[in-house]
Image (cartoon, rainbow, N blue to C red):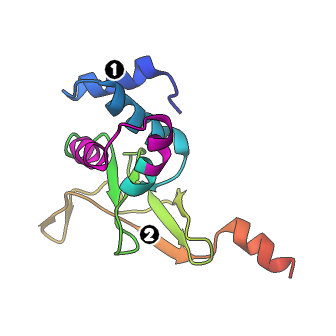
Amino acid sequence: MITNSVELKKILSSKGIKPTYQRLKILECIQGSGKHLTADSVYRVLVKELPTISKTTVYNTLKAFLKKEILVPLTITGTEVRFDYNTHPHHHLLCEKCGRIIDVNVLCPNLHRKEISGHCIHELHGYFRGVCSDCMKKLSKH
């Protein structure tokens, strides 16, 4: 995990995004949370520290980060977009009990394929629905 603002500045600059204070804080929020946050979640976290930040700034910044492939969008629930700092191909688990989305490392034979049955593949999103290990532990205690 990168927690150094110098490294985050390098990431933004390398993608052609000016590393303003607000952009750095937004990226730091997503990267440092260890979670897959929504834009509203990012706003709620940052407005406590930066009362002048607007939802528009958060949304526009996240959109720019997606365009430059600094973040990856997740739309597992179908009702919201969450943002993933891990841009390497991987799968996710949506816990039906607590609602968390968790990175899952599985060997998927199609993970890096660029063509399947004559179709050009640009992205692959794999996810599982079930109950996370933390919730399973709580269920087994009852």
Spot occupied by residue 84 in the image (x, y as percentages of width and height) = 41, 50
Q: Which of marks 1 and 2 is in front?
A: 1
State the residue position of label 1: 10
Front residue of 20/3: it is 20
Determine if the magenta segment contains residue 62. yes
Q: Residues within 10 Å of mark 1 (few under 14, many from 20)?
A: some
State the residue position of label 2: 127
Name the amino acid, label 1.
Lys
Spot occupied by residue 58 in the image (x, y as percentages of width and height) = 31, 45
Q: Which mark identifies residue 130? A: none
User: As displayed, is residue 112 above or below residue 134?
Assistant: above
Look at 52% across and 52% down and name the residue there.
35
Q: Which quadrant of the structure image shows residue 26?
A: top left
Spot occupied by residue 87 in the image (x, y as percentages of width and height) = 37, 45
Q: How many labels does the image show?
A: 2
Among all residues in the image, which is located at the extreme right?
141
Look at 35% across and 21% down and name the residue there.
9
- Direction from residue 138 to residue 97 in the image, left or right: left
Look at 44% across and 21% down and name the residue there.
5
Among all residues in the image, which is located at the extreme bottom?
142
User: Element under label 2?
Assistant: strand
User: As displayed, is residue 74 above or below residue 99?
Assistant: above
Name the amino acid, label 2.
Tyr
Q: Magenta-highlighted stretch: main secondary structure?
A: helix
